[in-house]
Image (cartoon, rainbow, N blue to C red):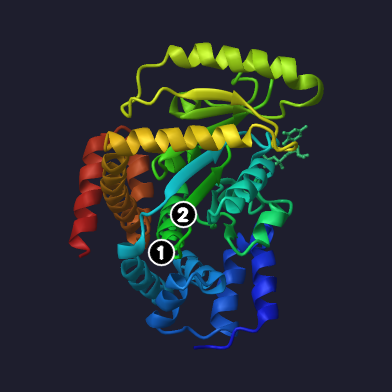
Amino acid sequence: MAKHPKNRTDRQIRKGVTQKQSINPNAAQHFLRHKRKQHPLSYYVDGILASDRVILGQAITLIESTALAHQDLAQQIIEACLPNSGQSIRIGITGTPGVGKSTFIEAFGTQLIQSGKRIAALAVDPTSQVTKGSILGDKTRMEMLSTDTNAFIRPSPAGDSLGGVARKTREAIILCEAAAYDTIIIETVGVGQSETAVHSMVDFFLLLLLPGAGDELQGIKRGIVEMADLVVVNKSDGDRQTLARQTKRAYQNALHLFPTKESQWSPKVVTASALQKEGIQEIWEKIQDFYTQMTTSNYFQQHRDDQAIYWLHESIRQQLSASFYGQAAIKEQLIKMEQKILAKQYSPFKAADELLQFWRKSF
Ligand code: GDP
């Protein structure tokens, strides 16, 4: 087995908690290409199964890599880990910037670790592709949790599409589960379609809100509240407690108006203070209630199976689209077709048919 100086381990773990470093794909590529030789498959698989955080991190870096050799190896690692995956609860957490997501994950994760759990916290941040900065990660996050050996914290992968980022995260979940993390937290921020993507990879979806303002004012998009299995009115401390209780009642009423969920779970609303570590236990109890109810009804497994099939089709859609739009000749043809459509020489449908025919001939 290759040498792993302890200091490198620590540095890497600390590196992993700040978004800036890891959202730079070039840096990751550079690191892989120049500083570290690629190890054989058994190195990664054995390391992951032995819950080695450094090797798990290295394997996820391979998943995130755009180099073909890395992607091949990453797929082999995922395949080898698959039989050992799935033994977890996957919790999605969303809420607007500043609502207290990282403070909550820190408090929640620390408490769970104290009760013997192992936490992996991953992030899906679509802003990392647009601005190369990010909403989730401009600060050092979850400092205490990230130093705990029973926690694995990983910032959002970068990518040129949300689909790509989501796929990498979904693959990373498999590796984290194989590394015996039994509670997987996927954090996202209310931007773009990221909540929907996260919702389709988790068992339980938790929405953090602030006391007072309605969801539109809080920048929560329509449909997000409907997805929630649990709404947490955070920052219920100091002089905000009365307001927080009012907000809780308002959301309880609002949730009643939504149609019954397929899972038959009726979503709950609680108040909490992540900062004061209050309400955390109640949240965990709600999640456990959910888990018991879902496993008893067998919905838990059925939902995961549905998600796996969804990701099969989603992945095909993404790859077909990338293969089509990625071709230089298609890009050229597309410009011409757009002009023809605007000049009313071609209908969009005829143009699409011709482009697809052109594409098929390229195989
Ligand atoms: P994120 O952007 O959603 O991850 O939010 P952070 O966890 O970074 O929190 C944003 C700010 O709100 C920080 O200054 C936190 O200390 C503060 N904060 C988070 N949770 C609470 C809470 O429960 N009560 C109070 N009073 N402040 C909180």
Query: What residue appears at the point 20 percent right and 44 percent down from the top-left corner?
Result: 353
Residue 38 on image: x %, y %: 47, 83
Q: Label 1 amino acid? A: Ala
Residue 18 left/right relative to 150: right
Q: Is mark 2 within 8 Å of ligand 1?
A: no
Residue 333 left/right relative to 187: left
Residue 350 left/right relative to 36: left
Ligand 1 is located in which of the four quadrants?
top right
Q: Is mark 1 within 8 Å of ligand 1?
A: no
Query: What residue appears at the point 41 percent right and 84 percent down from the top-left corner?
Result: 40
Residue 100 left/right relative to 290: right
Residue 332 on image: x %, y %: 37, 55
Q: Quadrant of residue 154?
A: bottom right
Q: In terms of secondary structure, where does tag 1 sit?
A: helix
Query: What residue appears at the point 35 percent right and 19 percent down from the top-left corner?
Result: 260
Query: Farthest residue in the right direction?
Result: 239
Q: Which residue is mark 2?
A: 182
Q: Please say if 71 is above or below 173.
A: below
Q: Is residue 35 in view?
A: yes
Residue density around tag 1, few if under 14, some if 14–19, many if 20 or more, within 10 Å: many
Residue 175 on image: x %, y %: 43, 63
How far separated are the C-alphas under marks 2 and 1? Answer: 9 Å
Check contact, mark 2 vs mark 1: CB within 8 A: no
